Image (cartoon, grey):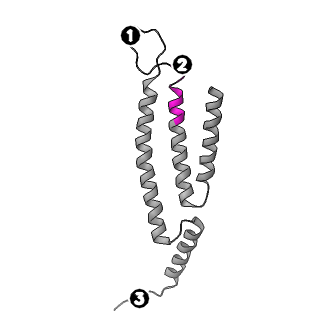
Amino acid sequence: MNVAVALTLGLLFGAGVMLTLRRDLVRMAAGSMMLTNVAILFTLSTGFGHRGEPLLSEADAQPMTDPLAQALGLTAIVIGFATSALLLALVYRMHEQHGSIDLRDMMRAELDEERAMSQEPEPPEDA
């Protein structure tokens, strides 16, 4: 079971890295969200090694799962949601400003803007 979980997490992590390296901002955001979710799944998978119950009374002698991994997972979910919302808002703002979500188009627009600003004549100074 541990090998299957490790392979699944490895494949998801690889897919997230592949999406993050794309030039499309939406795919980059999706890759970032996928990496966040893989990290959460990895954290949660470390707490379920014995497959015990989450909460047991002291009288039971069965193994208990680690509640710290669950607490860290919940915290990571909240932080990941906030980060994803901010990232998607930035992608939307870039689309509105440049009219594209491709990084090559944005780079060309920025270079054209810099060239246009450097070619403008400076206003004469009044003496």
Marks 2/3: CA–CA distance: 75 Å
* Residue 46 is inside the magenta segment: yes
Name the mark on residue 58: 1
The residue pinned by badge 2 equals 50
SS class, disc 2: loop
Which of the numbered marks, if any, corresponds to residue 123?
3
Q: Is residue 126 above or below residue 95?
A: below
| Residue found 45% across the figure and 51% down from its top | 84
Give the left or right position of residue 82, taking residue 101 as reference.
left
Local crowd at mark 3 within 10 Å, few (<14), some, or many (≥20)? few
Q: In which quarter of the image is the N terminus?
A: top right
Q: Determine the residue positioned at 51% across, 32% down.
A: 43
| Residue 64: percent from left, percent from top | 46, 17
The residues tagged by marks 1 and 3 sit, at their Cα atoms, a distance apart of: 82 Å
Q: Do the residues labelled 1 and 3 touch (CB within 8 Å)?
A: no
Amino acid found under the numbered disc labelled 1: Glu
Which residue range is magenta in the image? 41-52
From the top left corner, tell me how far across and down residue 2 is, in percent. 62, 26
Can you tell which quarter of the image residue 12 is in?
top right
State the residue at coordinates (53%, 58%). Answer: 26
* Quadrant of the frame with the C terminus: bottom left
Expressed as whole percent of the image width and height from the top left, the position of residue 105 reads: 58, 70
**Closer mark to the observer between disc 1 and disc 3:** 1
Residue 125 image offset from top left, x and y in percent: 37, 89
**Is 95 covered by the magenta stretch?**
no
- The residue type indicated by label 2 comes to His
Q: Which of marks 1 and 2 is nearer the N terminus?
A: 2
